[in-house]
Image: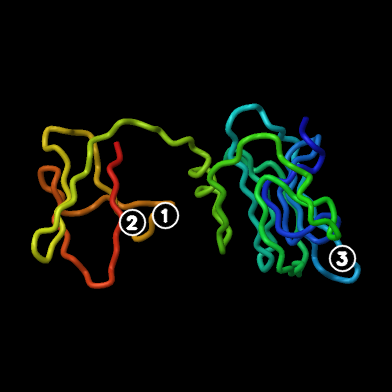
Amino acid sequence: VQKNGAGILCKGGGGGGEQFCIDLQPAGYRFYIWNGGNPNAATVVQTQVVPTGEWQSVTAVLNLPVRIMKLYVDGVEAGSAAPPATLLSNTEPVSVGARTPSTDSLDYTLNYQGLIDEVRLYNRDLSPVEIAQLAVPPVVTDGPELTIARNGASIEISWPADVTGWTLEESGTLQALSWTASAGVVNNRLTVPVAAGGRRFYRLRQ
């Protein structure tokens, strides 16, 4: 049985101690924050979207200076509110899949009944396009194997020459939202000079 207020992603104790929280109410997913003022007041985005028993992408966006506070489900905006000018500050840990019922409790008893995967926290607000991209389920295929070999001052990246329909992409970070096609690929082979202190990530995409 799903508990009322089951925590999905929260920071701080319940009942006014949360800096932010995404939880589940009977009506649907909820995103709320407290302003830390006197009095301490909450701003709530309550959606009418409930779990379906299938994987869903739930994304909360908060930007106080430009007054953005929204909650997206499966890449579609499901609710919004005008955020306050301030945000409660606390040193509590971020909890995933559970939260405490009050600031006086150390027991994480408001547990979410279900599976949670790929939790991400960003230090900026994502655009609607980025959120829509994150909501697209990944396509899992058995792709060709990349071979990486050192050749003097260069790295050679290759995959079987008879394999077609794949593009070598690269990025400076493993969790980048966008990857770029690698330039200079010839016959499914790319030679990359080794840069001191540098790093690049490569993948094949069909």
Horizontal side, residue 3 vs residue 51: left or right: right
Among the two numbered marks 3 and 1 on one chain, the one whose residue lies closer to the N terminus:
3
Label 2 element class: strand
Q: Which residue is mark 2?
A: 171
In the drawing, what numbered circle is on residue 176?
A: 1
Name the image quarter holding residue 12. Answer: bottom right
Residue at 20% from the left image edge and 54% from the top image edge: 183
Q: Amino acid at mark 1?
A: Ala
On the rendered image, what quadrant is the C terminus found in?
top left
Q: Residues within 10 Å of mark 2 (few under 14, many from 20)?
A: some
Q: Amino acid at mark 3?
A: Asn
Q: Which residue is mark 3?
A: 40
Name the image quarter holding residue 191. Answer: bottom left
Residue 28 drawn at (x, y percent):
75, 37
Residue 72 drawn at (x, y percent):
64, 44
Horizontal side, residue 57 vs residue 180: left or right: right
**Badge count:** 3
Q: Distance from label 3 to label 1 (Cα)?
A: 37 Å
Would you say the residues marked 2 and 1 are in contact, meaning their CB atoms lie under 8 Å apart?
A: yes
Q: Taking 81 as reference, is 138 above or below it?
A: above
Would you say the residues marked 3 and 1 are in contact, meaning their CB atoms lie under 8 Å apart?
A: no
Among the two numbered marks 2 and 3 on one chain, the one whose residue lies closer to the N terminus:
3
Q: Amino acid at mark 2?
A: Ser
Q: Taking 191 as reference, is 112 above or below it?
A: above
